[in-house]
Amino acid sequence: MVNISKESIIDSYRNLAKRYDFIANVYIMVGYRINSYRKESIDSLKLKKGDTVVDLACGTGLNFSYLQKAVGPKGKIIGVDITDAMLEQAKRRIDVHGWKNVELVYCDVEKYKFPNHFDDVLSTFALGYLPNYDGLIKRIYNALPIKGRFAELSFKKPKGKLIRQILLRVFRPFGNVEDSIDRRIWESVERHFDKTIFQEFYFGTTYMVTGEKIGNKS
């Protein structure tokens, strides 16, 4: 497995930022229900009105509209991303909708310091690019309050070489997918969290895992 440098990831997403939303929506045309997968991941957090949710590697803010419906205007969304150009697009989205409850944080998600008070964490199509994702997931668990949840949505290696080859070609615009799909992140979530739910989508090319913190582990 080849680890891609964060500098390369930042450069790739800087170039992709202005086209990212368009590319993401194109996949709907081939039956990839990306918006439904995002919504299911957010629904799995069981957010309530007034909650605070952290969206790690939020990108252009494609999750924000779903999160807004979940937490309401009295809730709060904290979007964290390492790429300035992606956050610029997220800021435009916030301004267009007039959202007053979204905070953007320009930061490496592996170094992000979680706030003292928050409820849940979300990450979509991002953690597979981090070689030390296990350490981050452990830190998420430790930072979450009791009954807090973490949901992760991402690509995975499907069964069958043909489907895998198609996956690598179709989703190449999102970065080094070949590297990220080899990382079985759901197993890390299952190891660190007390209770988990796992679900596959689109011929096994995509998965959602949600972990719940029941009590502090020693």
Image (cartoon, rainbow, N blue to C red):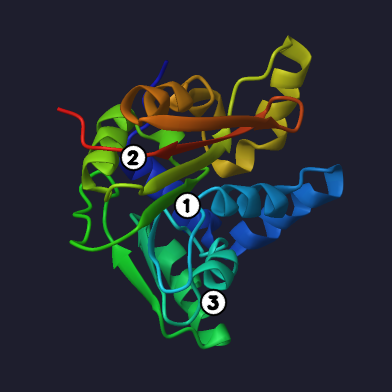
For residue 213, the mark is 2
| One can see residue 177 in this view | yes
Spot occupied by residue 35 in the image (x, y as percentages of width and height): 69, 55
Q: Nearer the viewer, residue 11 or 206?
A: 206
Give above or below for 98 relative to 131: below
Work out how far the residue at label 3 is from the one at label 2, CA to CA, in angstroms. Answer: 32 Å
Sequence-earlier tag: 2 or 1: 1
| One can see residue 56 in this view | no
Give above or below for 202 relative to 148: above
Amino acid carrying label 3: it is: Arg
Q: Give the residue drawn at x 37%, y 57%.
A: 83
Q: Quadrant of the N terminus?
A: top left
Sequence-earlier tag: 3 or 2: 3
For residue 93, the mark is 3
Residue depth check, mark 3 versus mark 1: number of the one nearer the observer: 3
Spot occupied by residue 210 in the image (x, y as percentages of width and height): 49, 38
Give above or below for 25 relative to 135: below
Work out how far the residue at label 3 is from the one at label 1, CA to CA, in angstroms. Answer: 17 Å
For residue 13, the mark is 1
Q: Secondary structure at mark 2?
A: loop
Residue depth check, mark 3 versus mark 2: number of the one nearer the observer: 2
Q: Give the residue drawn at x 70%, y 28%.
A: 167
Residue depth check, mark 2 versus mark 1: number of the one nearer the observer: 2
Q: Give the residue drawn at x 25%, y 31%.
A: 135
Q: Secondary structure at mark 1?
A: helix
Give above or below for 6 relative to 62: above
Work out how far the residue at label 2 is from the one at label 1, CA to CA, in angstroms. Answer: 32 Å
Amino acid carrying label 1: it is: Tyr
**Residue 167 placement, left or right of 101:** right
**Residue 152 placement, left or right of 8:** right
Q: Secondary structure at mark 3?
A: helix
